Image: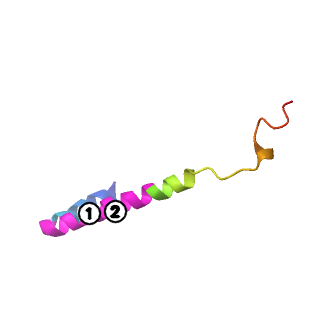
Amino acid sequence: MMIQEQILQSLNTLPPTTQQEILDFIAFLQTRYKSQVQSEKVPTERSLSDEPFVGMW
């Protein structure tokens, strides 16, 4: 957790308006990261022969 402590120490030395900018940037990064994770989870289109029910009869 050394990095978190360094971030907090650095953050505390900045004026409140700059701290708010950093908070906004973190929110942007969270949104961007969340959309990247969701796009990785989107199932890719498979062919019909890849479906598990094909060939069971």
The residue carrying mark 2 is 28
Dividing the image into 4 quarters, which one contains the C terminus? top right
Please state the horizontal and vertical placement of residue 5, each as a whole percent of the image: 27, 58
For badge 1, the amino acid type reads Asp
Whether residue 14 is visible here, answered yes or no, is no
- Classify residue 16 by image quadrant: bottom left
The answer to the question of whether label 1 and label 2 lie on touching residues, with beta carbons closer than 8 A, is yes
Residue toward you, 6 or 28: 28
Q: How far apart are marks 1 and 2 (CA)?
A: 6 Å
The residue carrying mark 1 is 24
Please state the horizontal and vertical placement of residue 22, each as a whole percent of the image: 25, 65
Q: Residues within 10 Å of mark 1 (few under 14, many from 20)?
A: few
Look at 56% across and 55% down and name the residue there.
40
Whether residue 57 is visible here, answered yes or no, is yes
Specify the segment rendered in magenta: 13-34
User: Is residue 32 covered in magenta?
Assistant: yes
Please state the horizontal and vertical placement of residue 24, each as a whole percent of the image: 26, 63
Dividing the image into 4 quarters, which one contains the N terminus? bottom left
Look at 13% across and 69% down and name the residue there.
15
- Classify residue 2 by image quadrant: bottom left
Look at 34% across and 62% down and name the residue there.
28
Seen as rendered, the residue at the extreme top is 57
User: Is residue 44 covered in magenta?
Assistant: no
Q: How crowded is mark 2: few (under 14 residues within 10 Å), some or many (20 or more)?
A: few
Name above or below for residue 15 compared with residue 38.
below
